[in-house]
Structures are given as C-alpha cells and as structure tokens.
Image: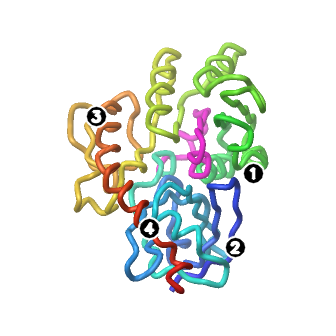
Amino acid sequence: MFEIVTKEMLTPAICRMKVRAPRLAAAAQPGQFLIVRADEKGERIPLTISDYDRTEGTVTIVTQRIGASSSDIISFEPGESFADVVGPLGCASEFVDMTPEQLASQRYILIAGGVGTAPVYPQVKWLKEHGVPVDVIIGAKTKDLLIYVDEMRAVCDNLFVCTDDGSEGFHGMGTNMLEHVVAEGHKYTQAVIIGPMIMMKFTTLTCRKLGIPAIVSLNTLMVDGTGMCGACRVSVGGKTRFACVEGPEFDGYEVDFDEAMRRQGQYKAEEAAANEHHVCRIGRGQ
C-alpha cells in the first residue's frame, strides 16, 4: 500500500500529494511518470512525477480534477493509501544523460502551461543543481490558476509569469511572453514545453520562429501507460511512436500535434458517461 503523507489543494481543482514509495523515489528521474490506481477497482492513471525525495522515500504527484478517476484520487486524505503506485516509467529527460561538458554549454528555457507547471519543477530543480542556467515561463488563464510560483522562483535563474487576462504578471500567453523575453536579449539553446496540447503546438511554432530547439511532453496522451493499449500512438518525424514507452518527451518540431489532439479526444464520450454515473469513493463508504 502507498500511503499519502501530505495533501494540499493548490487550486479548487488541482491537488498536490506526497506519497510514500521508497523504491520509486530511489529510481525516479525528471521527465518520467508513474501510474496510480486508487483502489482495487480503480482505473490506471498516468501522472508525471512532480518531485521526489530519495531520503524520505516519497514522490510528489499533482492531479487535476477532470473526470471520475481523478476525483477519486483527490478524495484520498493523509494516512490513507492508494492500492498501487507503479514506476518510474518512461524515459528520463535527455539532459540527465548529458556529460558535464555538454551541460556547461546549455541554457534552458522551460515553458509551463497550467497544471503542466508541476512536472516542469523537477526538471528545473535538476538543472539548477547541476549548474545549468535555466529560466522559466509559467502561464495560466488567470492568477487563481497559477501553481508552483514560489517553488519555481527558488530553483530557477529568472521566472516570468504571465496570465491570459493580465491578473498577474505579463498580460498575454506563454508565446507572447517568450517572444518578449527573447526580444529583451535572453538567449537559449533549448526549450522544454509542458502543458495543454494546443499550448505546446503554438509554443513550439514560436520556438521554431525564434530558432530555439523545443522538447514537448506528451504525457496527456497516455491511458494504459505501458504501450499495450495503443492510445498514446503519435507521429513524430513521420514515424509512429508510443508516448508511454518511447517518451513522454519528444522533439516538438517533429510532433504531429493535430493528430495528437484528435487522438486525445477519442475517449471523450466514455469520460462523459463515467462522470455522469460516478459515485465518489467516500459515497461508497470506502
């Protein structure tokens, strides 16, 4: 059993939990994900690892309430335990395997949208610990949906916050913020983009225009998380790839985002039906 150590609602719909999983914490790397199964009848939910503490033996997950299964995960309280937490799965971020000499030549910009800010955090933390200059852009629709602002500021060189409605920081989207930052003279060798699929598509297009190589995370495509179901198939450079076993990170220039967005919507009818008939685990007396 995997005990919830701490729980915090970052927004009314976004929950951060620290879960006791010593073996997983010992092996986790930035960019990887895990699978949570809330109870014996629960759906397998892939979640990108948002932090890990090898000494404590804990991993941190951030869950956004979207459907029935994510609502069940969020309903758990400290002291309760998930039935299963499996991982780490997927491939670590490519910089993990770089030599010190390669890292020394890099300057990263990480662009996070919405709940995608959470998996950006361990990447920024790792880069900073290894002496790599790293700036971060956090974007959200409004200031009430911003997460990890203080945490990110503590581990990056420069933090740029933007909101669509101008309620906090720069008034505009992440693409506008990126163009503004580059126009001010900031130069980058690599961008990493994590957020909603449409956000990653247009931020990648902006990176291409600015001449910045871009990596994106396709974790949101996953269902089974092991390559068996095929739901995470995506065309990358004209070839079929599986996000869960070959990713979740890929060269953004090569990703067919339009295909990925069509695939992402293939289970909407089933999700709607599950929400309509969902009974919270608390309501079941569990």
Q: Quick one: SS at disc 1?
A: helix
- Can you tell which mark lies on residue 151? 1
Q: Amino acid at mark 4?
A: His
Quadrant of the rendered image containing residue 57: bottom right
Marks 3 and 4 close (CB-CB < 8 Å): no
Q: Nearer the viewer, mark 3 or mark 4?
A: 4
Residue highlighted by disc 2: 6
- Can you tell which mark lies on residue 278? 4
C-alpha gap between disc 1 and disc 4: 34 Å
Residue highlighted by disc 3: 259
Residue visible at 48% across and 15% down?
Answer: 209
Q: Nearer the viewer, mark 1 or mark 3?
A: 3
* Mark 4: few/some/many CA within 10 Å (<14, 14-19, 20+): some
Q: Nearer the viewer, mark 2 or mark 1?
A: 2
* Mark 1: few/some/many CA within 10 Å (<14, 14-19, 20+): few
Q: Quick one: SS at disc 3?
A: helix
Q: Is residue 279 magenta?
A: no
Q: Earlier in the sequence, mark 2 or mark 1?
A: 2
Image x and y of residue 91, in percent = 40, 55
Q: Is residue 261 above or below residue 285?
A: above
Residue visible at 66% across and 34% down?
Answer: 137
C-alpha gap between disc 4 and disc 2: 25 Å
Q: Nearer the viewer, residue 123 or 271?
A: 271
C-alpha gap between disc 3 and disc 4: 30 Å
- Per the rendered image, the range of residues in magenta is 97-120
Q: Earlier in the sequence, mark 4 or mark 2?
A: 2
Q: Quick one: SS at disc 2?
A: strand
Left or right, 165 with respect to 240, comes to right
* Mark 2: few/some/many CA within 10 Å (<14, 14-19, 20+): some
